Image (cartoon, rainbow, N blue to C red):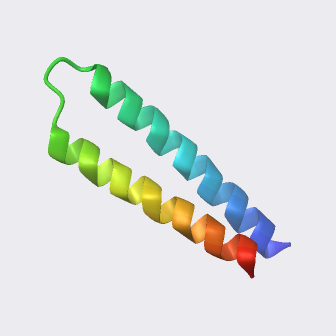
Amino acid sequence: MAVDARIRELGNRHSHLENEIEQELKRPSHDPLHILALKKRKLRLKEEMQFLRQT
C-alpha cells in the first residue's frame, strides 16, 4: 500500500512539473537551462515510478 501512495505522490509531482514546464515555455524570455533542469527532474520522477511499479 505504501508503494502505491508513493507512486501517486510522484505522479502528482510529475504532473506539477509538466505544468511548470508548459508555463515557462509560454514566457517570451524563458530560460532554457531552467527548462532543462525541470525536464531532468521530471524524467527522474518518471524513472522512479517505473522502478516502483516493477517491484
How far across and down, in percent of the image, does residue 3 sit? 76, 73
Q: Is residue 15 above or below residue 25?
A: below
How far across and down, in percent of the image, does residue 50 sit? 64, 67
Give residue 22's quadrant in the image.
top left
Residue at 69% x, 67% y: name it.
6
Residue at 36% x, 50% y: name it.
39
In this image, 48 relative to 38: left or right?
Answer: right
Front-lying residue, 34 or 51: 51
In the image, farthest residue toward the bottom: 55
Q: Is residue 33 above or below residue 4?
A: above
Q: Is residue 51 above or below residue 42?
A: below
Locate the N terminus by quadrant. bottom right
In this image, 15 relative to 3: left or right?
Answer: left
How many callouts does the rendering have? 0
Front-lying residue, 51 or 14: 51
How far across and down, in percent of the image, does residue 9 sit? 65, 57
Residue at 45% x, 44% y: name it.
17
How far across and down, in percent of the image, does residue 49 sit? 63, 65
Q: Is residue 7 above or below residue 22?
A: below
Give residue 27's quadrant in the image.
top left
In this image, 34 relative to 21: left or right?
Answer: left
Locate the C terminus by quadrant. bottom right
Residue at 63% x, 75% y: name it.
51
